[in-house]
Amino acid sequence: PIHVQPEWYFMFAYAILRSIPHKAGGVYVMFLSIVVLYLIPTLHTGKYRSLCFYPLNQVVFWVLVGSFISLTWIGARPVREPYIILGQCLSVIYFSSLLLNPLSLWVWDKLLEYPKFCVSRPVDLKWFKFLAYFKLLKLVNRENSAREWANKCSKM
């Protein structure tokens, strides 16, 4: 019924429930959206415990918060056409940001790994440009060019 609405702290799950046309699938995804909130602490698989070292993950986190707040707002709106499409899009963003969380941690950790043959000091920001160029050269399968460039930079 139109007049039935849950409490404000379950509005995001209610918006996800309304955005899926299949009833059983909607109930399943609604419960999954609540359970996933309990799993967020276990998704942190990075080398550093704080998110201040992971700028990509900070963006993913704020996208998750924004989609959560937007879904809460949409859950209080009537079941009409612009809100149904917005609820579907925000539901996809909500779950995809939870999937991108460990991936962004892994990407950033791989980016900050130093090549062992070039540098043997701890990570600091002045070497970030060097690392970015080195990883970019390795990414495009230019291993020899990356080694030559790293040797040239280490001689300077």
Image (cartoon, rainbow, N blue to C red):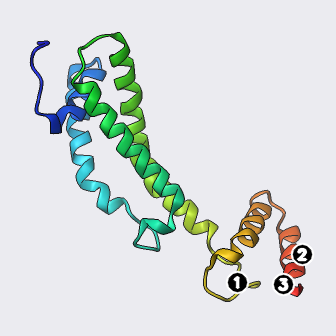
Q: Position of residue 106 (x, y in %)?
A: 52, 62
Q: Which residue is mark 2?
A: 148
Q: Which one is nearer the viewer's eye here, 144 or 154? A: 154
Question: Gap in Å between the C-alphas at discs 2 and 3?
Answer: 10 Å
Q: How many marks?
A: 3
Give the crowd class for mark 3: few <14, some 14-19, many >=20 residues within 10 Å.
few
Q: Can you see residue 66? A: yes
Residue appearing at x 21%, y 43% in the figure: 34
In this picture, is 4 found above or below 121?
Answer: above
Q: Which residue is mark 3?
A: 154
Q: Position of residue 101 (x, y in %)?
A: 44, 54
Q: Can you see residue 25? A: no
Q: Amino acid at mark 1?
A: Lys
Report if the CB atoms under discs 1 and 2 are less than 8 Å apart.
no
Q: Counting residues from the N terminus, which is met first, the one under dot 1 or under dot 2?
A: 1
Q: Which residue is mark 1?
A: 116
Task: State left or right for residue 139 relative to residue 111.
Answer: right
Report if the CB atoms under discs 2 and 3 are less than 8 Å apart.
no
